[in-house]
Image (cartoon, helix red, strand yellow):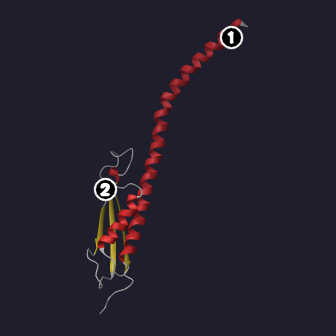
Amino acid sequence: MRILRSTTLQAKSKRCGATVVEFAVIAPVAFFVIFSGIELSRMSMIRNNAEIAVYEGARRGILPGATAAAVTAEVNHYLNLIGVKQKTVTITPSVITGQTQQITVSVSIPVASSTWVVGKLTKGKTITKSCTLSREWINKF
């Protein structure tokens, strides 16, 4: 009996060392996969929310009495919900009048400033979305 217990303890201590080595090899790969999944999800969320933001901004711009400032505020509202800090909003035409027939809203977001983990890998990349809608009411007089 005594010999069996000693052999069992030695086998467990050897296995414990193997477990530590296996963890040291697998952990970086596992963390890379997990954080890559988080970052890809974040970039997809930014892309989808940018699309929603320009659409809602354009919808705000086609209403009678709309201003470029109101359109910009609408786009910023949707992008601020997910924490996008750096963005460039462009409204064409820059002054909305009664004769304006179409509104185009564009947004450009640098990816590196909006991601959480791998900003250096996405340096120089931007997410750009645009939406053009016709005005509901045009003052033709």
Q: Is residue 4 visible?
A: yes
In the rendered image, residue 107, in percent from the top left (x then y), is placed at 33, 64
Residue most extreme to the right: 1
Q: Residues within 10 Å of mark 1 (few under 14, many from 20)?
A: few
Q: Which mark is residue 86?
A: 2
Residue found at x 33% / y 80%: 65
Looking at the rendered structure, the secondary structure element under dot 2 is: loop
**Real-space Cα distance between discs 1 and 2?**
64 Å
In the rendered image, residue 96, in percent from the top left (x then y), is placed at 29, 78
Please tell me which residue lies in front, 97 or 26: 97
As displayed, is residue 76 above or below residue 97?
above
Please tell me which residue lies in front, 33 or 91: 91
Q: Amino acid at mark 1?
A: Arg
Looking at the rendered structure, the secondary structure element under dot 1 is: helix
Q: Quadrant of residue 18?
A: top right
Residue that badge 1 annotates: 5
Q: Is residue 129 visible?
A: no
As displayed, is residue 3 above or below residue 73?
above
In the rendered image, residue 78, in percent from the top left (x then y), is placed at 40, 63
Q: Could you tell whether 40 is left or right of 93 in the image? A: right
As displayed, is residue 24 above or below residue 140?
above
Residue found at x 29% / y 52%: 124
As displayed, is residue 62 above or below residue 79?
below
Q: Amino acid at mark 2?
A: Gln
Residue found at x 37% / y 85%: 137
